[in-house]
Image: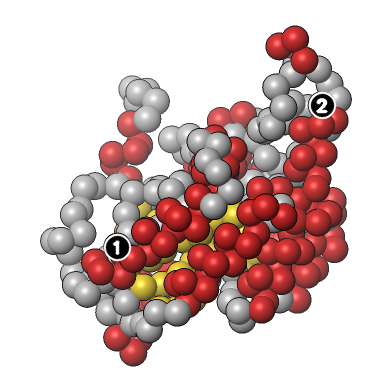
Amino acid sequence: MTQPIGSSVLARAPYQSIVRRPRLTLPGDARVVLWNIVNVEVWEPTAAMPRAVLSPPMGAPMLPDVPNWAWHEYGMRVGFWRILDALRARSMPASFALNGAAIPRYEEVCTAARDAGWEFMGHGLVQRPMHKVEDQRAAIRETIDEIQRFTGKAPRGWESPGLTETDDTVDYLAECGIEYVADWVLDDQPVRLRSSKGPMTSIPYTVELNDVVISAVQQHPSDEMLRRGKAHFDRLYQDSADTPRIMAISVHPYLSGVPHRIGYLEQLYDHVLSHEGVLVWTGEQILDWFNAQQPEGK
């Protein structure tokens, strides 16, 4: 019998409160892990844009959508380099979530991320919801192959475009060797997800400290990432007296890399780093730590 759409969700992530689970500990009695994610996407001028800063004239979408395509393209030409400098100046690693098609399209950007030692994680082949991908297995494998060819290493993590998943996506990802996903924004700590094809872990990604949500969807002022981020970190730091927490900051070059926002992001980085007991890890470092703390099946 065919299961209703969405039936996999509760089956994959049984409820488990953070106050009733085995206690985790960080090296050196650290309290908070900062996880930086930089997202790089391919927006095709031959198709509708994933997002828009300008609504279409007279309400009728038209192709090519030059202003909205160029809005994103600014991030790849200019904004990315500001974010790279901000992270490099603070000696912080990042997870580089990229569309597989970004490697040939933006090879200079991808080379800079590789040279900086960032972790590469899959972010779909192009910026399209997984529900609209005709062959998810093929798209996942092609993305993994592109990253492995470019970096010499297959990605261990995956962030779906728009955090979208069908009932089958996690199984396909596990089948292709992906070990963690960032789509399940439901906790402050890693949690296990059930998969029919092998182990899978959810690493705490964010829609709260995500510039797409803050700047493009909710359209807050330029300083909202700093204001919200400081309050977010301060509370996690307080909570972490009992058990460690993960704090993700997710940015996109066309949003956080613009002149009126980058300074506020830098101030947020400095606020977090000014506290003792803060580790800055990539997604795979968080995964390895969690696996060592709670081996699969225990």
Q: Which residue is mark 2?
A: 65
Mark 1, other Cα within 10 Å: few <14 / some 14–19 / many ≥20: few
Image position of 64 with respect to 81: above or below? above
Q: Is the C-beta separation of discs 2 and 1 under 8 Å?
A: no
Q: Residue furthest left?
A: 20
Instruction: Tell me if I can see residue 39 in this picture.
Output: no
Mark 2: secondary structure:
loop
Residue 2 in the image, given as x and y percentages of width and height: 37, 23
Q: Amino acid at mark 1?
A: Arg
Image position of 127 with respect to 27: above or below? above
Compared across the picture, whether 121 is left or right of 182 comes to right
Q: Which residue is mark 1?
A: 235
Real-space Cα separation, disc 2 to disc 1, in angstroms: 42 Å
Image position of 259 with respect to 221: above or below? below
Residue 162 in the image, given as x and y percentages of width and height: 55, 40
Residue drawn 35% across and 37% down? 8
Mark 2, other Cα within 10 Å: few <14 / some 14–19 / many ≥20: some
Image depth: mark 2 or mark 1 in front: 1
- For the C terminus, give its image quadrant: bottom left
Question: Which one is earlier in the sequence, the residue at label 2 or at label 1?
Answer: 2
Compared across the picture, whether 71 is left or right of 266 comes to right
Mark 1: secondary structure:
helix
- For the N terminus, give its image quadrant: top left
* Residue nearest the observer in this picture, 12 or 70: 70
Residue drawn 29% across and 86% down? 29
Instruction: Tell me if I can see residue 75 in this picture.
Output: yes
* Residue nearest the observer in this picture, 264 or 122: 264
Residue 240 in the image, given as x and y percentages of width and height: 26, 71
Compared across the picture, whether 268 is left or right of 55 comes to left
